[in-house]
Image (cartoon, rainbow, N blue to C red):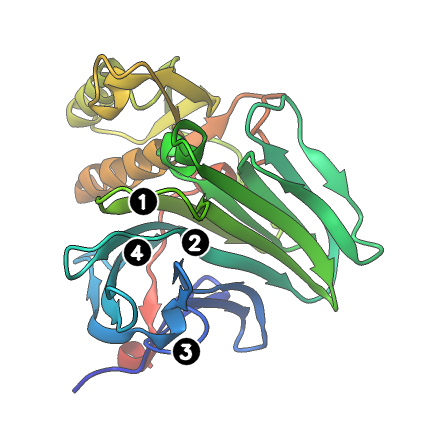
Amino acid sequence: MVEDRFDIADDGAVWGFPRRGKNFLELSRDGGAAFFRLGRVKCGKFGGSSALPEKFRLHRSGDGVEFELEYSGVIPFGCEYRVMRDCRVSGGCISLTTDISAVTGGKVDGIELEPLTFCGDMNKVEFLIFGEEKFRESKLSASGTLYAGGEVPLMLRVTYADGGRCEAALGGDVWRHRAAAAIPGAVSEYELTASGGELKLTRRVLKYDAETEPERRPWRFNTLIGWNDGRPTPAPCGEAFELPGCAMSAASRRNLRSLVRRSERSLNWRDVAPSVCGESAHVSRSGRGNLAHFDLDELLAAWRWANRQLGKNGSHLILTPKPGGLFADSVILGNLGRPPTVLRDMKVDI
């Protein structure tokens, strides 16, 4: 039997994944209306809502704290485009990897990634444009364009009237979201607009002019999404340690794994400060010059891995933000300040 939708309950919210339709993800509270939606990819002139699904599978970890959704579908127009997604859900966060390729050996003629739409009674929006040193802020008191430009928003966060917060951020592959700047005849277009009680981020990561021949290659993009209901993060506990520098570096990964494997008690990675780094060796591309990457998704991956290991003896890892840091108020990073909780597949576990 092929499922038409998966719904995963996560501490008061539900991550809903329709197999078909306009949206790939609908995030709601307690079975109510969606307060966040993630649309589908557009390749060239053709939208992903027309894709014919090939794979739609949900996997649950043995301890129940993580789900993985696998999706693939083909847009049956033009040269035909295959869209594949790997989506991991845990701790109030998802990490989404989207792969896009031309099925028949053709070329991907422009890419518009999944639009991000925040809905409902919103009080405030904060967003950080790549290259800027502080978040822009708006009270959402009127409709209009809050941002339009060729530089990518690194993080976007909305606060709702009930205190809940929802956040979207780039994954580690910032350089891919900025790839158009290095391709002659290509541009990126990002637009953040407020209208009719909705806030929408449109992400045209690759747009070619009429005279430019697209590259014959597949593309991959990573996105992070997190939410919480506004409750304060519990006071940190566990044996404290620090690992300064980019979390995606080989040294940081090696040191963390060594600490976790030696530990017999809970750990607190303190003074964590996500950052953008340009060292290409951190993304396994030594000698490729400056390749901008954001290590927040590495922190999420490290939290997941460490808690799988420590959970075997009843311990856990939490991350504590550096006070006053640029991302100290991040929803995603804040969620990593809690031990993982068990999720529920609503069709199976009711």
User: Quarter of the image holding residue 101?
Assistant: bottom left
Under tag 1, what secondary structure?
Answer: loop
Q: Mark 2 — residue?
A: 113
197 is higher (above) or lower (below) than 201? below
Under tag 4, what secondary structure?
Answer: strand
Q: CA distance from mark 2 to mark 3?
A: 16 Å
Q: Earlier in the sequence, mark 1 or mark 3?
A: 3
Q: Check the picture and name the quadrant holding the N terminus.
A: bottom left
Q: CA distance from mark 4 to mark 2?
A: 15 Å
Q: CA distance from mark 1 to mark 3?
A: 28 Å
Residue, x 32% and y 43% (percent of image)? 213
Q: Residues within 10 Å of mark 1 (few under 14, many from 20)?
A: some
* Horizontal and vertical percent position of residue 132: 62, 24
**What kind of residue is marked 2?**
Leu
User: Quarter of the image holding residue 284?
Assistant: top left
1 on left or right of 328: left
**What kind of residue is marked 1?**
Pro
Q: Mark 4 — residue?
A: 87
Under tag 3, what secondary structure?
Answer: loop
Q: Earlier in the sequence, mark 4 or mark 2?
A: 4
Q: CA distance from mark 1 to mark 2?
A: 17 Å
Q: Mark 3 — residue?
A: 21
Q: Residues within 10 Å of mark 4 (few under 14, many from 20)?
A: some
**What kind of residue is marked 4?**
Cys
Q: Earlier in the sequence, mark 2 or mark 3?
A: 3
Q: Mark 1 — residue?
A: 214
Residue, x 27% and y 20% (percent of image)? 282
* Horizontal and vertical percent position of residue 230: 62, 51
* Horizontal and vertical percent position of residue 342: 33, 59
CB of mark 1 within 8 Å of CB of mark 2?
no
